[in-house]
Image (cartoon, rainbow, N blue to C red):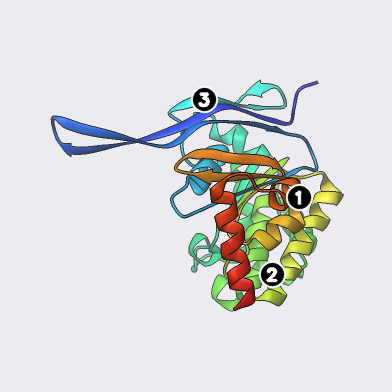
């Protein structure tokens, strides 16, 4: 039986043209492979510049890989067919304030993916927007609000609603809790877990917060310089870290906790 998501030897190079006749290539992600099933959560951790966010963008289709393949439900994803991918794999960015157009009401923000990817009537789209707002704990009246009228936590709920609007199978979240205070962060973590159990979602989280990673993830990748240097079940990796990068991250987190 095919896995929900299967990634095979995914790599990414960036080419820089220093002169018209000269270019240099830098590998930022090298031969990443893994697979996931419904209800599973993979967390990706590592230092800045390790390739975490690049991997997230490749999975969501925000960037194209240099090489490698991604399979969804046993079918290879076409890097040019973003419409198909966007229905099944959705992305949440770190700062919802920068991804929400300040001049567009929330209802219109959520309706746009439905216009582009479905044949729903205007009435059906409105009902869908109201339903998804309810799923993330917001009243239907919020569809008339503008981003500046919302708190940071409410903006992230809207970002989550936008990810859910097409009923995806996979959500890729790039540091979604980073800018939140502890109380709001706890509420959002619980909401993510509740939605996963209700709708069978598969999550891929990029995070710096190892305590959250321990709480929400089944598996973890520890990345450094574009490579996965340690991987496995989260509890096992964090209880018995084998690589120095993993030990360094755990030590840094402990130092922050004790200050």
Could you say which is closer to the camera, residue 98 or residue 187? 187
Badge 3 or badge 2: first in the primary sequence: 3
Using the image, determine if residue 213 lies above or below residue 121. below
Horizontally, residue 225 falls left or right of residue 74, namely: left
User: From where the camera sits, is residue 131 visible?
Assistant: yes
The disc placed on residue 68 is 3
Horizontally, residue 199 falls left or right of residue 203, namely: right
Dot in front, 2 or 1: 1
Q: Which residue is mark 1?
A: 235
In which quadrant is the N terminus drawn?
top right
Q: CA distance from mark 3 to mark 1?
A: 29 Å
Q: CA distance from mark 3 to mark 2?
A: 35 Å
Q: Residues within 10 Å of mark 2 (few under 14, many from 20)?
A: some
User: From where the camera sits, is residue 118 visible?
Assistant: no
Using the image, determine if residue 92 lies above or below residue 60. below
Say which residue appears at 69% left-offset and 56% top-offset. 213
Q: Which residue is mark 2?
A: 185
């Amino acid at each position: 039986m095919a896995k929900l998501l299967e990634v095979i030897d995914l790599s990414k190079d960036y080419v820089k043209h220093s002169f018209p006749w000269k270019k240099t290539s830098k590998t930022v992600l090298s031969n990443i492979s893994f697979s996931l099933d419904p209800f599973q959560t993979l967390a990706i951790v590592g230092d800045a510049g390790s390739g975490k966010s690049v991997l997230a963008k490749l999975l969501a289709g925000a960037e194209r890989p240099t090489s490698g393949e991604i399979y969804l439900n046993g079918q290879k994803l076409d890097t040019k067919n973003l419409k198909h991918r966007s229905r099944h794999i959705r992305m949440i960015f770190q700062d919802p304030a920068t991804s929400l157009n300040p001049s567009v009401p929330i209802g219109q923000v959520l309706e746009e993916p439905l216009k582009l990817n479905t044949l729903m009537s205007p009435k059906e789209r409105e009902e869908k927007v109201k339903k998804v707002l309810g799923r993330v704990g917001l009243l239907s009246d919020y569809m008339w609000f503008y981003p500046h009228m919302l708190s940071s936590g409410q903006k992230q709920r809207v970002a989550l609603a936008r990810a859910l609007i097409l009923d995806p199978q996979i959500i890729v979240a790039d540091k979604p809790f980073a800018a939140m205070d502890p109380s709001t962060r706890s509420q959002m973590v619980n909401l993510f877990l509740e939605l996963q159990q209700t709708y069978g979602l598969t999550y891929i989280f990029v995070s710096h917060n190892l305590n959250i990673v321990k709480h929400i993830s089944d598996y973890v990748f520890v990345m450094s310089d574009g490579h996965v240097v340690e991987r496995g079940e989260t509890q096992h990796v964090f209880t018995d870290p084998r690589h120095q990068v993993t030990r360094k991250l755990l030590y840094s987190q402990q130092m922050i906790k004790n200050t």
